[in-house]
Structure formats: C-alpha cells, structure tokens
C-alpha cells in the first residue's frame, strides 16, 4: 500500500500573490478546505508544505503555500504533483478502497482460474471499469456492477470475481 496519494497537479500561478491553480484528483473538492499542508515529491522522498489559504470552485482548487508570496515562486511549482499522506487522507467508508491500493492485485474467478493483474481502474462516471492484464497476453475489462466482484483482500493483494457474471459483462482483448 502506498503511503502518499496524489491530490492533484499544479496547473499555473493564479494572480501575482503566489497562489497556484490545482487540477484536483478527488471527487470532492471540499477535501482541500481545512488542509493545513500538502506534500511535494522531491527525489525519493516527500517535502511538507504548509498551506496559508485554500479556496475551491466547481473544477479546481487554489492554494497559497507558506514561503510562496509572488508569481515567480508560484511559477516554479507549475506541473508539480501535490500529495497527502495516508494518515491525513480522507477516511473511506467500509467496503470502499483507494484505487492505488487495488492496483497490482491478482485477479481470479470463482472457479479458481487466474485472470491476471489489475492494471487500471477507469472512472467512467456511471461505473468503474476494471482493466486486468491477462496472464497470457491481452486484457480483460469488466464494469464494477453488482455481483461481479465477490471479494477484495487488500492485505493479500487478491480479488475474486464471479465467473458466470464475468462472462456476461467482460470484454476480452486477447
């Protein structure tokens, strides 16, 4: 499991007082309100940056960071990703998981057949679509609809899907 989650990416400076416009990678932009800090990746580690001011609109977050007080300082952050540590990340309700925790899971069906490794989860708006890199070659894609996924074990890194229901909804690119 990852210790840090991407919250977004700095798009550009916003104005002349050091504020940056952030493309948010969260469903709930209000998550930025009340954050006291974020992290930036530096080499193999992460550096904590305090937040002075935060505001959001319908699509973006706007952050003013400690030590950044002008457009030139904000410009240096352009394109950088911002992170939050697991301890301060939003708590998910039971039965919900962070995508980054599921990627890499070994996927098998209820008959014990190995399907492959979960490589991606595409968020389409109505239902997530799981993309599994097949053990042979190609991919298996299936929507996260009721009854398809029987079990997810984050600690073991495994997922079991219903073989019968999978045949009804899966798309195979093999």
Image (cartoon, helix red, strand yellow):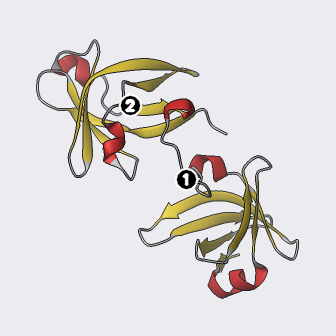
Q: How far apart are marks 2 and 1 (CA)?
A: 30 Å
Query: Whole-percent x and y of residue 118?
Result: 68, 59
Count all numbered tags in the image, as a single digit. 2
Q: Which residue is drawn at 70% across and 51% down?
A: 104
Nearer the camera: disc 2 or disc 1:
1
Query: Whole-percent x and y of residue 152?
Result: 72, 59
Q: Going by the picture, which residue comes out furthest to the right?
A: 112
> Is 165 placed left or right of 123 in the picture?
right
Q: Going by the picture, which residue comes out furthest to the top?
A: 67
Where 76 sits versus 117, above or below? above
> Is 28 placed left or right of 129 in the picture?
left
The residue that disc 1 covers is 93
Q: Which residue is drawn at 30% across and 30% down?
A: 78
Where 118 sits versus 2, above or below? below
How crowded pointer 1 is (Cα within 10 Å; few <14, some 14-19, many 20+) is rated as few
Residue nearest the viewer, comparing 14 with 172 = 14
> Is 6 placed left or right of 145 in the picture?
left
Quarter of the image with the C terminus is bottom right
Label 1: element kind: loop
The residue that disc 2 covers is 80
How crowded pointer 2 is (Cα within 10 Å; few <14, some 14-19, many 20+) is rated as some
Query: Whole-percent x and y of residue 38?
Result: 41, 27
In which quarter of the view is residue 20 placed?
top left
Where 95 sits versus 52, above or below? below
Q: Residue at x 11, y 29 (%)?
A: 15
Q: Residue at x 41, y 34 (%)?
A: 81
Upstream in the sequence, badge 2 or badge 1? 2
Quarter of the image with the N terminus is top right
Pointers 2 and 1 in contact (CB under 8 A)? no
Label 2: element kind: loop
Query: Whole-percent x and y of residue 17?
Result: 13, 21
């Amino acid at each position: 499991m990852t210790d840090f989650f991407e919250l977004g990416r700095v798009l550009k400076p916003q104005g002349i007082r050091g504020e940056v416009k952030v493309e948010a990678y969260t469903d709930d932009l209000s998550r930025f309100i009340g954050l006291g800090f974020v992290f930036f990746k530096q080499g193999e580690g992460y550096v904590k940056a305090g937040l002075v001011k935060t505001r959001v609109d319908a699509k973006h977050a706007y952050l003013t960071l400690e030590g950044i007080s002008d457009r030139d300082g904000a410009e240096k952050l352009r394109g950088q990703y911002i992170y939050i540590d697991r301890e301060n990340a939003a708590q998910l309700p039971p039965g919900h998981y962070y995508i980054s925790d599921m990627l890499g899971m070994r996927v098998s069906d209820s008959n014990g057949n190995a399907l492959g490794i979960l490589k991606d989860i595409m968020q389409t708006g109505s239902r997530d679509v799981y993309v599994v890199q097949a053990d042979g070659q190609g991919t298996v894609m299936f929507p996260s609809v009721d009854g398809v996924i029987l079990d997810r074990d984050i600690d073991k890194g495994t997922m079991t899907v219903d073989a019968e229901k999978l045949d009804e909804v899966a798309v195979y690119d093999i």
